Image (spheres, rainbow, N blue to C red):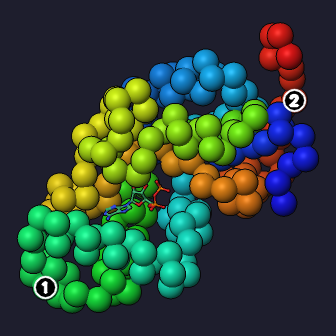
Amino acid sequence: MANKNPKEERTYVMIKPDGVKKGLIGEIIKRFEQRDLKIVALEMFQPTREEIDNHYPKDAVWITRLGEKTIGTYNKYSFDLMEDFGTIEPEKIGPEIRKWLVDYMLSAPLVKMVVEGTHAVDMVRKICGPTFPYLADMGTIRGDFSNDSPALANAEKRAVANILHASETPEEAIHEIEHWFGKKETHRYKRHGE
Ligand code: ADP
């Protein structure tokens, strides 16, 4: 259920291994804060495989969608799905991409945070830019700091490295904040001028 006070909308953000290794922790926080969003919880941690596995959806629709995206990339660039995956079925390709994603997320410590403010979910997604960095506009985090693409990533048998994760809907944010912070404290304070 979405929060009643628009100023108190919260979203979950996780800086991925490439974001941490590129030294972008401060830059990312800066971009949220300069847009009047509040950091109300923050921590660096090394996740377990189980935690990451439970973070990403396991339902057939989500997994098939991952497979379909890869099929789209392969068709666009005339790559050979049979050669790389031994199948052309999205429901069989999706689990492979999901496995690459879990491996990638375990390859370095992550930074998790809860970001609060008006339209926090949409605003943070806008600041991040779309999933594939090579399509992200300049001025977004993904557009400014990465050129990764599924064509390159899939050829190298890995997930697309796109610097950070951010919840897609307020409902997903509530679920992800509960998953990653549980009973841990989030903070309340007024920003200057509030
Ligand atoms: P987002 O993280 O932008 O919400 P998705 O939920 O669609 O995007 O995908 C989850 C993550 O899986 C992406 O952030 C990216 O790291 C990876 N990913 C998505 N699609 C592909 C793909 N076709 N090939 C490799 N990795 C992918």
Identify the residue at horizontal 17%, vertical 87% (top origin).
86
Q: Residues within 10 Å of mark 1 (few under 14, many from 20)?
A: few
Element under disc 1: helix
Name the spot of residue 115 as percent of width and height, x first: 69, 36
x and y, in percent, of residue 20 in the image: 43, 35
Residue linked to disc 2: 188
Q: Is residue 77 above or below residue 46?
A: below
Q: Quadrant of residue 21?
A: top left
- Tell me which label, 2 or 1, sits earlier in the chain: 1
Measuring 30% from the left and 45% from the top, which residue is drawn there?
135
Residue 54, given in percent of the width and then of the height, sits at 59, 69
Residue 166 circle label: none
Farthest residue to the right: give it. Answer: 4
Q: Residue furthest top?
A: 193
Mark 2 Cα-neighbour bin, 10 Å: few <14, some 14–19, many ≥20 = few
In which of the image's four quarters is ligand 1 placed?
bottom left
Residue 108 in view: no
Q: Amino acid at mark 2?
A: Arg
Name the quadrant of the N terminus: bottom right
* Residue type at the position of mark 1: Met
Q: Is residue 141 left or right of residue 4?
A: left
Q: Is residue 125 left or right of residue 96?
A: right
Q: Which residue is mark 1?
A: 82
Q: Secondary structure at mark 2?
A: loop
Question: Is residue 66 at least partly visible in the picture?
Answer: yes
Front residue of 16 and 194 = 194
Q: Is mark 2 within 8 Å of ligand 1?
A: no
Q: CA distance from mark 2 to mark 1?
A: 53 Å
Picture quadrant where residue 144 is located: top left
The residue sitting at 19% across, 59% down in the picture is 151
